[in-house]
Amino acid sequence: MIGGMPVLDLTASSVDLTRAICDIPSESDDETRLADAIEAAVSAYDHLEVIRDGDTIVARTRLGRSRRVVIAGHIDTVPINRNLPVEDRVVDGQDVIWGRGTVDMKAGVAVQLKLAAELTDPAVDITWMWYDHEEVDSSLNGLGRLSRNRPDLFEGDFAILGEPSNGEVEGGCNGTLRALIRTDGVRAHSARSWIGENAIHKAAPILARLAEYRAREIEVEGLVYREGLNAVRISGGVAGNVIPDACEVEVNYRFAPSRDAEAAVRVVRDVFTGFEIDIVDVAEGARPGLDAELAREFVDAVGATPKPKYGWTDVARFSALGIPAVNYGPGDPHLAHHDEERVPVTQIDDVERGLRAWLSAR
């Protein structure tokens, strides 16, 4: 600790760095202490040019290589819930680091910081990005802000996002859409309910259509993406003795990257024909991009069998810029945001070994 700022030792192992980074709380909108520590740590290395935008830190090599790879990871977490500081535990016979951020995605960031410091002569030029506000509204996303403020920093031939993938390569990602499906009624005293019209009761067909919906599996460039359409929130009601005159069902549609936003909106409008629909948020997915030369080399080097990414991740931002991108990081994505979030130590080591070998290969 120097003057109240935590110090990161990038000569430590990726496992020890994971512990250190996780123990610096950085819930969304509170990333500054960790961003300061990362900036100070990477600024000590002469082979890196360091740029800061808000709480996003960029470090890049300028070696004149013919190809450039962008490697990114977010530094914020969802709220802590009695799961910091981290603990070393044994779960199902595995040594794990247990605590908030271990999976999503500080173990991946730790690997990236370790390699950023040590790879002084990589086979490709590398742009490392550690960014803020990934876990909140996309309008606040540090990567999105950086792409608007410094689009030149996104020049690259291939991108890797350190999202948890169990140490496997996950290509592209599903898109995501949120819609509000509304019903209207007429208020009345609940003792005389026949005088009014119950808007909550009118939502029954919406729920029925959702219950009947069957998730589709769609193949895109050799990977099979599973879609989903689900209610995630219902609101309505005035008081305990009033027939409600309004009801709102929030629906989340996860759609394969073969669809664009317009096509996804059509699907939702078709399913809920006859209802008032308000599309409140939509983000297109990303095609796998595994046919790119660097992508093929990467997959071969780490010895992985690519899988689809079902959730939306920031690989979509790179894809929108014409940069093929994959997800590759330690941690089980099913444990992201979980109160028992934990990452196997072996996965941290394996991801570091895979990235190091590929970035060093000539």
Image (cartoon, rainbow, N blue to C red):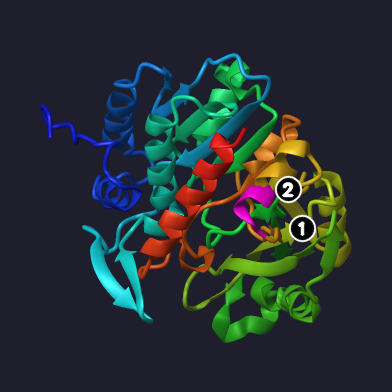
Q: Is residue 268 left or right of residue 4?
A: right
Q: Do the residues under discs 1 and 2 have CB atoms within 8 angstroms?
A: yes
> Disc count in the image?
2
Position in image of residue 97 (x %, y %): 31, 63
Q: Nearer the viewer, residue 358 or 153?
A: 358
Mark 1 vs 2, N-terminal side: 1
The amino acid pointed to by label 1 is Phe
Task: Residue 199: tell me if it is visible.
Answer: yes
Q: Is residue 72 magenta?
A: no
Q: Quadrant of residue 57?
A: top left
**Which residue is nearer to you in this view: 176 or 206?**
176
What's the magenta region?
A: 299-304
Residue under label 2: 285
Q: Residue furthest bottom?
A: 191
Question: Of the numbered discs in the image, which one, if any, rests on residue 255?
Answer: 1
206 sits to left or right of 271:
left
In the visual, does 34 lie left or right of 325? left
Q: Residue at x 57, y 17 (%)?
A: 150
Q: Nearer the viewer, residue 227 or 20?
A: 20
Residue 76 visible in rendering: no
Q: Secondary structure at mark 1?
A: strand
Whether residue 16 sits left or right of residue 142 in the image: it is left
Give the residue drawn at x 59%, y 59%. Answer: 168
